[in-house]
Amino acid sequence: MANALVQFRTDETERTKAAAICAALGMDLPTYLRMCMSRLVRERGIPFHMHLDDAPMMRGIRAMQHTSMIAREQGIADMSLDEINAEITATRESL
């Protein structure tokens, strides 16, 4: 298998910190980057959880994902806007 050169630019301070972390783990930065690429290919996706726990937008996205899951479980995920509005109207009238 032929080797390919991959280059990219990054902030020098960030590179230095990343290299120090790698050294503390007993490897160099290029070894870590090869490991990440191998995992990306093997898992066919990002090999780590990506999250912004404190961001209000992420809380909103998680709420929408949860709502979508409930809709799928209840068999109502494919309701039209007219059907949704009819449900709301019927619920309001019953109160």
Image (cartoon, rainbow, N blue to C red):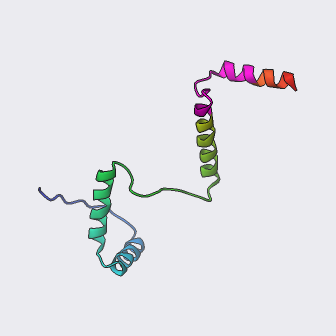
The quadrant the C terminus occupies is top right
Q: Residue at x 59, y 58 (%)?
A: 53
Residue at image location 26% in from the left, 61% down from the top: 7
How far across and how far down the image is residue 30, in percent?
A: 27, 69
Relative vertical location of residue 59 with respect to residue 12 in this rendering, above or below? above
Nearest the viewer among 8 and 27 is 27
Front residue of this view, candidates 95 and 29 = 95
Residue at the farthest left position:
1
At 65% from the left edge and 22% from the top edge, which residue is drawn?
81
Image quadrant assignment for residue 70: top right
- The structure residue drawn at horizontal position 64% and vertical position 46%, both measured from the top left corner, is 60
Q: Is residue 58 above or below residue 24?
A: above
Residue 84 inside the magenta-drawn segment: yes
- The residue nearer to you, when weighing 95 against 61, is 95
Range of the magenta residues? 71-87
> Which quadrant of the rendered structure holds the N terminus?
bottom left
* Residue 39 placement: quadrant: bottom left
Q: Is residue 78 magenta?
A: yes
Q: How many marks?
A: 0
- Provide residue 16's location: percent of width, then percent of height: 37, 76
80 displayed left or right of 14: right
- Residue 11 in the image: x percent, y percent? 40, 68
- Residue 68 location, quadrant: top right
Horizontal and vertical percent position of residue 69: 58, 38
Toward the viewer: 12 or 19? 19
